[in-house]
Image (spheres, helix red, strand yellow):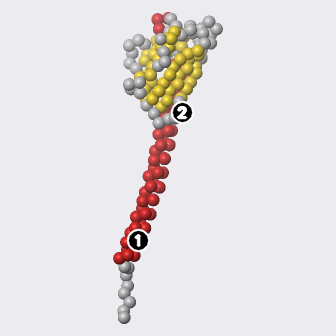
Amino acid sequence: MRAEHGFTLIELIAVAVLLGFVAVFAGLFVSTGARGTLAARQAEENAQKGQIALARIALELRDASGGPSGGAPLVSATSIQYTTSQALLPGERTLAFDAGGARLTLTPQSGGTAQTLVDGVTACTMGFSGTGADHNVVFTVSFTLNGMAQPFSITVKPRNAVSTPVGS
C-alpha cells in the first residue's frame, strides 16, 4: 500500500481556526495600543491648550486696574469685566465663558470681537475674594476641558489697587 502525502480536511480546519484566534488577539492588541496613543496625544494637546489659556488669563488679570467706565470690576460666575493698564493694549476687557461655543473668550473694548483663548471647555467658574480697601482682591478662574478629569485653575492678584469687584 502506498503512503499518501498531504493534510486531512480536519487538520486544515484546525489550522485555520488557530490562525483566526491569533489574528483576533493580535488585532485587539494593536487597536488597544493605538487607542492609548491617541488618548495620550489628546491629553497632551489639552494640557498645552489649558496652560496657554492660563498664562494669558494671568497676564490679563494681573494688569487689571479697575472696571468698566472707571468703576469696579464686574464679576459673575461666567465672566469678569475689567479695565487693564497694559501699556500696549490698555482699555476695557471681558473674560467670559461661552457655553454655547464651549470656549473661553477675551473681548477687548466694548463691542469688540471675542477672541478664543481655549476651546473644548465643558465647565467654567469665575470669581473673586478680598476687598479693595486692603488691596487684597484676588480673581479666580477655573475651567475643565473636554476629555480631562481635572480642572485647570488659576488665582491672580492684580498688581494695581483694584476696587472691590461687584458681583452680577
Using the numbered discs, state the Cα–Cα distance from disc 2 to disc 1 in whole angstroms.
Answer: 49 Å
| Nearer-the-camera pick, 101 or 162 | 101
| Nearer-the-camera pick, 165 or 25 | 25
Image position, residue 115 (x, y; %): 41, 22
Q: Is residue 26 visible?
A: no
**Which mark identifies residue 15?**
1
Residue at image coords 47%, 31%: 145
Which image quarter: residue 112?
A: top left
Label 2 sits on what residue type?
Gln
| Nearer-the-camera pick, 135 or 122 | 122
Residue at image coords 47%, 27%: 123
Image position, residue 48 (x, y; %): 51, 34
CA neighbours of label 1 inside 10 A, class few (<14), some (14 to 19), many (20+): few
Q: Secondary structure at mark 1?
A: helix
According to the picture, the residue beneath numbered tag 2 turns out to be: 150
Q: Secondary structure at mark 2?
A: loop
